[in-house]
Image (cartoon, rainbow, N blue to C red):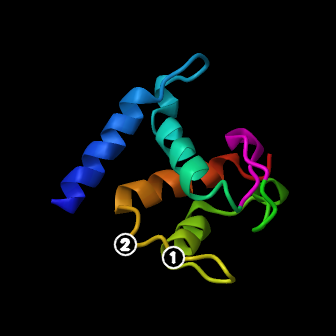
Amino acid sequence: MRAAVAATSLLLALAGCGGAGETEADGAAPAGRQLFVSNCGSCHALADAGTNSSAGPSLDAFAPSRESVEEQVRHGGGGMPAFEGRLSDAEIEAVSTYAADHAGR
């Protein structure tokens, strides 16, 4: 049931997060951006997301791989909490892809 609710939430986020300048190829980016802002933005700066916290490392300062972001999001470490169990696998993949694609710019 939880997985169905999470999947529905992700689909609603994808459907509701459109806007000027976004293309079909950016389909997962709006959901990843929304997840980043609501789950990561209070600690991490990322210009594309409009976040500027200095509690954690600024993602604008380096360009991590999607795999390393996903590992960090899932398991935490270095003061960051783990999000596995808080976010679904699809949400973790979306936020990891978004962060990796927009960090270091």
Residue 40 located within the stretch drawn in magenta: no
Residue 40 % position (x, y): 61, 58
Residue 64 % position (x, y): 70, 63
27 shown above or below 47? above
Q: Are marks 2 and 1 in contact (CB under 8 Å)?
A: yes
- Residues shaded magenta: 44-52
The residue carrying mark 2 is 85
Q: Residues within 10 Å of mark 1 (few under 14, many from 20)?
A: some
- The residue located at (29%, 53%) in the rendering is 6
- The residue located at (69%, 83%) in the rendering is 78
Residue 36 % position (x, y): 58, 51
Q: What quarter of the picture does the N terminus occupy?
A: bottom left
Count of numbered tags: 2
Name the element at disc 2.
loop
The residue carrying mark 1 is 82
Name the element at disc 1.
loop
48 shown above or below 74? above
Residue 90 placement, left or right of 77 = left
- Which residue appears farthest toward the bottom when viewing the image? 78
Q: Amino acid at mark 1?
A: Ala
- The residue located at (40%, 62%) in the rendering is 87
Q: Amino acid at mark 2?
A: Gly
Q: Residues within 10 Å of mark 2 (few under 14, many from 20)?
A: few
